[in-house]
Image (tube, grey):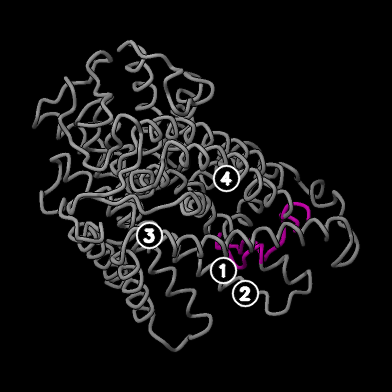
Amino acid sequence: MADESHEPNELPESGAPDAAAEPNELKRGLEARHLNMIAIGGAIGTGLLVASGATISQAGPGGALVAYVAIGFMVYLLMQSLGEMATYLPVSGSFGEYASRFVSRSFGFANGWNYWFNWAITLAAELVAAAIVMQYWFPDVPGWVWSGGFLAVLFAVNAVSVRGYGESEFWLAAIKVTTVVVFLVLGVAMILGVMGGASPGFANWTAGEAPFAGGFTSILAVFMIAGFSFQGTEMLGIAAGETKDPEKNVPKAIKSVFWRILLFYVFAIAVIGFLVPYTDPTLLNPDGDVTLSPFTLVFERAGIAAAAAVMNAVILTAVLSAGNSGLYVSTRMLYALAEAGQAPKVFTKVNARGVPMPALLATTAVGAVGFVLSLIGNGVAYTWLVNASGLAGFITWMGIAWSHYKFRRAFVAQGHSVSELPFRARWFPFGPIVALVMCAVVIVGQNVEALTGHSSFYVLLSSYIGLPLFLALWWGHKLATGSPSIAAADADLSRSH
């Protein structure tokens, strides 16, 4: 049975861009440079700029590198899967729509709401983080002042137009990219002994338990952290629905994922591993908290003046970029859910600039409520919300892999040739199957201590609360609607309605 959901901004059969959108439709206002930077911006955040040092401290330079290479390979496979579907069906609902078309409407319903919740709550988390960063320069100003101000700015940027979001994300991402490139150049110069004193050689890779400190358990722990660090790369699937000439621009962005992973994560972890011993107390204090960004540490040792202030500014950029993108993608997902009849119809309304304003207002309000909850009591309610959203990204990734597997089967079953696809994922069916299994390992193993009984039931529940919430959405919708699984022969492959 074909999916009855309707996406008004889909491509006609020829794949030509929607040049003149109707008043109540999204507009294709994103260009190739915007899409590329959105994809890059999704790969560079506080996970790289701040937490990367903690991963080396936990697992040693070799352990951290193995974990990031493995997760980077998984993300590459996932982006191949997403690229194949997003190029053929560039819709704003993206993986929520694909799940509805190729798996079941109930699975699509759960995926869409899961993703909206993930980024709406992440927006609140980024507001909290931004306030903390601002304390570096203005310790006497209450944090809520900065959080409220930044939320207003992010709302204004997203309310202008999709191009306004694209431009802001382009420049925010450019700052992050420039920082990482400068870091790599300086780092290599220091490794070679050109600056910053004598070359450390391989000393930090052989000291103590290095390169693999803590054994397999430590690598598994870093495996989870690395996975969280890569979340956001799937955003280009949402952005494809508002991108000009998606058949040309989406594959370009997807193909660059491998090089971004290699350059921004693998090389950066390797450079840090050469320059900073995993036992350095500035990477992680006895309480397990990050005390200093490894980027700040390397810049200081290279003799860069005001390195801490510069890196704090870059980290603020990363936080605002994540909040900006989170507000954008969650707004579009809520709009797509309403278009599919899975959310109140009011969220389908789009203004003359192509912005789904009711969806934007609702998502902004949820982000604001999440931030307020962080101020009440000890922030217990907020902590539970953040924990619940923590697994949401991996659940989304599993949905992408499963949807792609079902999409390709349906495409062939309905008499199509794979050669007809504008972009073909590599290594099918190996790619989506491996990505699906690896995501499952990350989800199950994210808190090994809780699973093995070394933590309280409270810790176990708070760690995994996102999983039963997702299953409740999925099976609740299925029980309420009787929605069947989609057979390959019945899947909706139409590119226009």
The image quarter in which residue 101 lies: top left
- Work out which quarter of the rendered image holds the N terminus and state it: top left
Q: Give me the C-alpha separation between circle 2 and circle 1.
A: 6 Å
Whole-number angstrom distance, CA of label 1 to CA of label 4: 24 Å
Q: Residues within 10 Å of mark 1 (few under 14, many from 20)?
A: many
Find disc 4 in the rendering and name its residue: 222
Residue bearing mark 3: 163
Residue flagged by tag 2: what amino acid is it? Val
For the C terminus, the image quarter is top left
Pointer 2 residue: 310
Residues shaded magenta: 272-295
Q: Nearer the viewer, mark 2 or mark 3?
A: 3
Q: Is residue 121 above or below residue 82?
A: below
x, y percentage for residue 168? 44, 65
How far apart are the two marked residues, 4 and 2, measured between alpha carbons? 27 Å
**Which numbered disc covers residue 314?**
1
Q: Of the two numbered discs 3 and 4 on the same chain, state the one appearing first in sequence.
A: 3
Q: Would residue 284 be counted in the magenta stretch? A: yes
Q: Is residue 287 visible?
A: no
Element marked by disc 4: helix
Circle 2/circle 1 CB separation < 8 Å: yes
Tally of numbered discs: 4
Callout 2–callout 3 Cβ contact below 8 Å: no
| Disc 3/disc 4 C-alpha distance (Å) | 37 Å
Query: Which numbered marker is on residue 87?
Result: none
* Label located before the other in sequence (2 or 3): 3
- Residue at 44% across, 71% down: 130
- What SS does tag 3 mark? helix
Q: Earlier in the sequence, mark 1 or mark 4?
A: 4
Q: Amino acid at mark 3?
A: Arg
Mark whose residue sits in front, 4 or 2: 2
> Which element is circle 2 on?
helix
